[in-house]
């Protein structure tokens, strides 16, 4: 049986996101309040509003607070764009070492591990991402993709459903849920 894996363009796009920085504690506190409000709006949004809110959340989550972390993420992006996976992993590992509380660094590295089929490493980094940001629906989607690639459809479906509960209009997640639903429901009978 052939499994259709998520399009790697979305994974690479997560890595390619250019981060902005937010340095003050007050800004970080405001960011967490903004995140809660944005997530609440996302759950109630129509598809057009969801796209705008999704961009806002990704911009918020991309705030590293460190010029060094920004540089490492940018170098990783450039390495991925040029197909240099080893350099991308080196930069992202340096990023996670330098900024271990920056969830997006872990998410970006998990995406690279997924792309090279190092699923155990991808799972570990996704778990770290979600420990830092439990509402990171792209990381939850990533968990589903890894489970699906590992031929664990029930766990994949559960992860996809969890991501969809946070972001009801996430197209890739919706497609994944629809793809697995018949298989999961068929096992339940």
Image: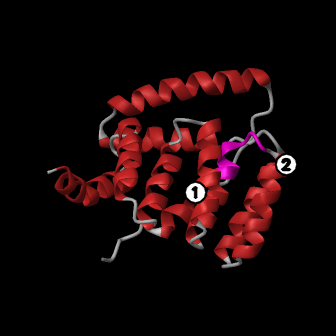
Q: Which residues are magenta?
A: 100-106
Kindly identify which residue carries mark 2. Answer: 98
Element on which disc 1 rests: helix
The residue wearing badge 1 is: 14
- Indicate which disc, 1 or 2, sits on the residue closer to the N terminus: 1
Rendered image coloring scheme: secondary structure
Q: Secondary structure at mark 2?
A: helix
Residue 110, position in %: x, y? 62, 58
43 relative to 58, above or below: above
Q: Residue at x 62, y 66 (%)?
A: 113
Q: Can residue 89 be seen at all in this image of the molecule?
A: yes
Q: Nearer the viewer, mark 1 or mark 2?
A: 2
Q: Characterize the local packing of mark 2: few (<14), some (14-19) or many (20 or more) Cα atoms within 10 angstroms.
A: some
User: Which of the 4 image quadrants contains residue 6?
Assistant: bottom left
Seen as rendered, the residue at the extreme left is: 189
Which quadrant of the rendered structure holds the N terminus? bottom left
């Amino acid at each position: 049986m052939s499994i259709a894996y998520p399009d790697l363009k979305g994974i690479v796009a997560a890595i390619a996101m250019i981060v902005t920085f937010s340095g003050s504690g007050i800004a970080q506190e405001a960011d967490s309040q903004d995140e809660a409000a944005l997530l609440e709006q996302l759950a109630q949004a129509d598809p057009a509003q969801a796209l705008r809110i999704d961009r806002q959340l990704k911009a918020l989550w991309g705030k590293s607070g460190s010029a060094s972390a920004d540089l490492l993420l940018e170098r990783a992006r450039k390495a991925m764009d040029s197909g240099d996976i080893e350099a991308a992993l080196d930069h992202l590992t340096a990023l996670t070492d330098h900024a271990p509380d920056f969830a997006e660094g872990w998410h970006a590295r998990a995406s690279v591990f997924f792309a090279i089929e190092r699923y155990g490493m991808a799972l570990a980094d996704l778990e770290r991402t979600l420990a830092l940001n439990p509402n990171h629906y792209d990381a939850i989607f990533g968990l589903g993709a890894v489970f699906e690639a590992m031929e664990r459809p029930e766990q994949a479906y559960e992860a996809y459903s969890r991501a969809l509960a946070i972001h009801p209009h996430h197209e890739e997640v919706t497609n994944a849920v629809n793809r697995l639903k018949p298989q999961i429901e068929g096992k339940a009978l």
